[in-house]
Image (tube, rainbow, N blue to C red):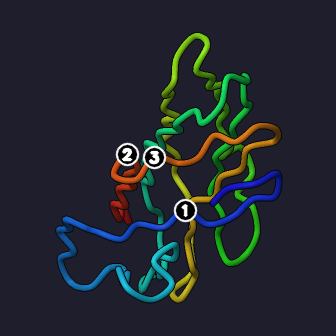
Amino acid sequence: SLSSSFAGITFNTQSKYNSGGVYTHSTSSNSEQITLNETGDYEVSTDITFDATSGTIDPCEVRLSLAGSAVNGATSYTYVGSTFADKSTVSMTRIISAVAGNVLSVEGRVTSGGAQALAGGCRVTVRKLS
């Protein structure tokens, strides 16, 4: 459940191609965390769909967090409200540099209103570049 503070978005199912164990992720424990197992550059793409729960227009934000800190320049925004569109998707792709063992999270918040991340409507793709 999202509120006005950033919180990790959980990924409870996965379809992955993880050649060589580049990252680890559990669908049952800390499912909002992806541990990057190798130092290097990663391409991270996210699609997070928000669902309106009331007639208000709700501002929604999504950001990437690495090792517990927000990644500079990795925040995206949308508005959702059942008066004009009851669902809206925030998409972003960023290149990040990580050290082996860094934990990557996709975090979201709704600064006002009751919109929530749509179950089954959230995706993250992590690809190691170098």
Closer to the observer: label 3 or label 1? 3
| Residue 117 x, y percent position in the rendering | 53, 48
Q: Which of 48 and 42 is in front in this view?
A: 48
At x 57% / y 10%, what residue is drawn?
Answer: 84
Question: Mark 1 touching mark 2, by CB under 8 A?
Answer: no
For label 1, the crowd category at 10 Å Cα-Cα, with few meaning under 14, some 14 to 19 and many 20 or more, is many
Q: In this view, does 21 lie to the left or right of 107?
A: left
Residue underneath mark 3: 118
Work out how far the residue at label 2 is from the one at label 3, CA to CA, in angstroms. Answer: 5 Å
Q: In which quarter of the image is residue 97?
A: bottom right
Q: Is residue 76 above or below residue 26?
A: above
Question: Mark 3 touching mark 1, by CB under 8 A?
Answer: no
Residue underneath mark 1: 9
Secondary element at image label 1: loop
Residue underneath mark 2: 121
For label 2, the crowd category at 10 Å Cα-Cα, with few meaning under 14, some 14 to 19 and many 20 or more, is some
| Residue 1 x, y percent position in the rendering | 63, 60
Question: Mark 2 touching mark 3, by CB under 8 A?
Answer: yes
Secondary element at image label 2: strand
Q: In this view, does 8 lie to the left or right of 93?
A: right
Work out how far the residue at label 1 is from the one at label 2, CA to CA, in angstroms. Answer: 11 Å
Three-letter amino acid code at disc 1?
Ile
